Image: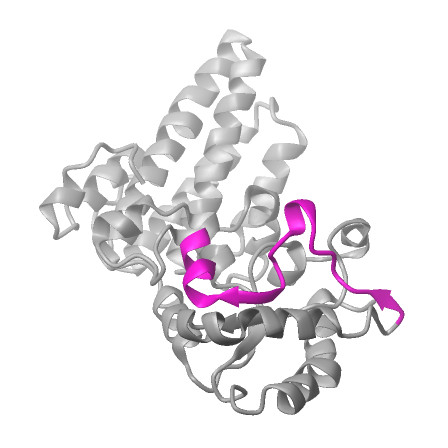
Amino acid sequence: MNKGMDLARGYYLEFGRPMLEKNFPQYVSRIACGFAGEGSDAFGFDDRLSRDHDFGPGFCLWLTDEDAEKIGPALQEAYQGLPETFQGIGRKTDEGMASGRTGVIRISDFYAKYTGMPQGPSTLRQWLQVPEQFLATATNGCVFADPLGVFTKIRERLLAFYPEDVRIKKLSCNCHKMGQAGQYNYPRLLQRGDFVAAMLALSEFTEAAMKAVYLLNKRYAPYYKWTFRGLADLPKRREIAPLLSRLCKDPCWEENVQVIETICIAIREELMEQKLTKKTSDFLCDQSFSLIAEIKDPAIAGLPLTVG
């Protein structure tokens, strides 16, 4: 089965690059080309089910503001004039929720869309405020060509991951959620027979556990639908994914309490391996406070535990 990224690259190489060389020779050295942003195919997560919406060949042409003013409309027209099909598959649509995902895009607009800032976040507060899924979306996919380097310079700065104080603050927040929802509240709710609240606690624990694994791997967690799928691509603490899968198969199974403890032990071990904590407690609320003590910036350390 053709993957979306392979279609994007092939479509660019066969039709896109020749079009640029023929119609915009003076700007070939200034145009960044690739495929990144929204959609399962930009993450490499697309499968057969993905073909029922926003699937097909297409790519992005990223321009500086200056170049967008000069050639943006003409370049978009040329892009729209490329073949409607490639390898028997119709080109991506540019309408509805899929509008603006391919074709000509200002570099400043691309990063502002996902981070709120044309150059991406710079201060610790800004880094903390951008949702992880948007940072994941801004840095996924692949750049096929960027001779000018403007798009890639911002991309590489974001891919270098959070400043360490922000990463630790987010780890602290997720450890607190894991301890509060999973280790403390979940077993108590099962004992009360409050299975709806128990499922909510388990959901909170599961999301926090997955985000903690991403943070420990220095990778941004994607949109919730793909967070679990993305765990398979992370090298550290791969043993946690099957444990989470077991939890969710039977959310009110009493033995889940021990599975939760096993997951929390693995997180604590990784925190210690990365020298982020010296505390040996497996109760992750304890680890949350220990992590806060490692943050150097007092303004970030002073934020509520649940901020992150």
Please report the residue visible at 32 percent of the width from the left and 44 percent of the height from the top.
Answer: 129
Residue 140 place in picture, x, y as percent:
53, 63
Residue 178 place in picture, x, y as percent:
40, 34
User: Which quadrant would the N terminus be assigned to in this image?
Assistant: bottom right
Name the outermost residue toward the right.
88
Depth check, front residue: 267 or 308: 308
Residue 295 place in picture, x, y as percent:
16, 50
Q: In which image quadrant can residue 111 be found?
A: bottom left
Please report the residue visible at 55 percent of the width from the left and 30 percent of the height from the top.
Answer: 256
Residue 138 can be seen in this image = yes
Relative horizontal placement of residue 208, taking residue 86 as reference (left or right): left
User: Which quadrant would the C terminus be assigned to in this image?
Assistant: top left
Relative horizontal placement of residue 89, taking residue 43 as reference (left or right): right
Please report the residue visible at 50 percent of the width from the left and 8 percent of the height from the top.
Answer: 192
Q: Is residue 103 found inside the magenta-colored segment of the image?
A: yes
Range drawn in magenta: 88-113
Please report the residue visible at 39 percent of the width from the left and 60 percent of the height from the top.
Answer: 218
User: Would you place residue 258 above or below residue 296 in this image?
Assistant: above
Relative horizontal placement of residue 253, taking residue 165 as reference (left or right): right
Name the outermost residue toward the left.
298
Q: Is residue 132 found inside the magenta-colored segment of the image?
A: no
Residue 141 place in picture, x, y as percent:
57, 67
Residue 283 can be seen in this image = no
Which of the colour schemes (rainbow, by chain, secondary structure, one colour) is used? Answer: one colour
Q: In which image quadrant can residue 7 be found?
A: bottom right
Depth check, front residue: 271 or 140: 140
User: Would you place residue 210 above or below residue 192 in this image?
Assistant: below
